[in-house]
Image: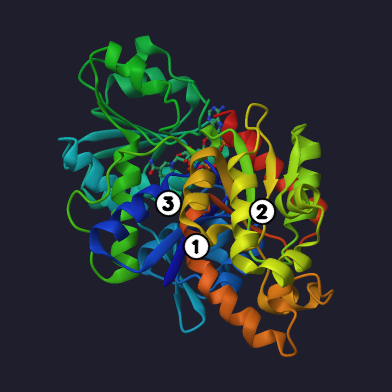
Amino acid sequence: MQLYGVIGHPILHSRSPDLFRQAFAAENRPADYLRLAARRFDRAIDLAQSLGLAGLNVTSPFKKDAAGGADSLAETAARLGVVNVLIRQNEKWRGDNSDVCGVLATLREGGFEPQGKRCVILGAGGAARAALLALRLGRASRLTVINRTWTKAQAVAGEFATEARAFSQLPAALAAADLLISCLPPGADPVVAEWLPAGLTVLEANYHQPLLSPKARARGCRTIDGRRWLVHQARDAYRLFFGAPPPEGAMTADWPPPPAAKPAIALIGFMGTGKSSLGRALAQRLSAPCFDLDESIGQHTGRAIAQIFAEQGEAEFRRIEKDILHGLPLAEPPVIACGGGVLLDEANRRFLQQHAVCVWCWSALPAILARTTDQTRPLLAVADREPVARRLLAERIPLYAAVADLVLDTEKQSIETAADLLADEIRSARNR
Ligand SMILES: NC(=O)c1ccc[n+]([C@@H]2O[C@H](COP(=O)([O-])OP(=O)(O)OC[C@H]3O[C@@H](n4cnc5c(N)ncnc54)[C@H](OP(=O)(O)O)[C@@H]3O)[C@@H](O)[C@H]2O)c1
């Protein structure tokens, strides 16, 4: 199975996994797609490499870092200095940009042909640069960049040989425009409704609770949904990963509720990946109760896990584990530190996927072997542990990937740092 993923910070809100999983299902492709949590680009790449990912999408704020960090760049990415797709080829990362294709396809699908049109781009970041190049390629007649920071507007306009105007000139620029592409982040809302003429077409890049689009519709403008941009750039990224786009209509903005809407948090992953310590540290930060499944089994049965395995076998242990998991009180949503094999049971997978943000705690095999020498893990209580652990991990990776809402590195950062990052991700996604 091949793994792909998306990096950015924060990242738990990202809808890219929904889009790629739709396409993988439509094509019966043995692949899965993950959100990787990291505060820094180099950490995210480290995690992607440790997991053996074959390709990545890159989102805010890592797109420029990705252009600097890629081993080689495709022409569009080099021209923009912005990378939103990384493809792993022969142990090297090649950077590309699918936002340019995404913007053009979105405008055309929305009935807006840029040729000969006057366009205002609001913002001067990565999305704005992709929009500028797309409109250049689409032969727009006039491009105006307007940005909060004037020097950045000037720099970007200079790069694309077009004009920059001060923020105070936005109303006049809009009055004479056919298209406005807003490339501002969620919450930024500088456009006053009265500035929007009825003939204007508006594309708002941000699709999380958009503020501009409702105003534009109320003014009689045509609006194009920013989620279509996400879909089209994902289609083009898919083409870059696999050589051909997904089947028409396979990627849609018809998404399940976001992971952060689920009340509990479950830490999943192989034994020795720090789930128990992380569970306690996270529960403390979120003021939530913490349930350690293995500990609960010990309390419930009065016996150590190794003893249950030895006296009654693994099947009985799994039965007790399942009973305890499905009986957990969810009224006050807990942090659940799961045992490494809990996902072997399909009903357990469904239960966790339904009720909990599932966070896959990842450490590579050497770290796992170093941390599991204490003989308390019955499955690794053998003379030659390495091949057994390798086989078990390989068998379980597809299960962890299928359920994971987020992947967290628990090898190269301390439990405290990992807990801080995870708490930030959860809070940020819940506040959107
Ligand atoms: N739909 C899609 O598929 C798609 C694709 C790409 C991006 N996006 C979304 O587009 C947005 C921008 O992405 P990006 O990568 O271009 O981000 P970015 O590189 O961080 O640029 C953000 C831009 O917004 C401006 N800005 C930030 N806060 C502002 C405020 N309160 N008032 C006015 N201007 C403000 C910044 O101005 P300064 O220069 O003054 O800081 C900067 O020009 C994000 O929400 C991203 O998720 C969506």
Rendered position, 320 above or below 227:
below
Residue in the image at 62% along x and 61% along y: 316
Q: Nearer the viewer, mark 3 or mark 1?
A: 1
Q: Which residue is mark 1?
A: 399
Q: For the residue marked with disc 3, what is the amino acid? A: Pro
Q: Is residue 169 visible?
A: yes
Observer-nearest of 43 and 294 = 294
Q: Residues within 10 Å of mark 1 (few under 14, many from 20)?
A: many
Q: Residues within 10 Å of mark 2 (few under 14, many from 20)?
A: many
Where residue 230 sits, quadrant-wise, is top left
Q: Are marks 3 and 1 in contact (CB under 8 Å)?
A: no
Rendered position, 280 above or below 123:
below
The N terminus lies in quadrant = bottom left
Observer-nearest of 168 and 54 = 54
Q: Is residue 9 visible?
A: no
Q: Which residue is mark 2?
A: 338
Q: Residues within 10 Å of mark 3 (few under 14, many from 20)?
A: some
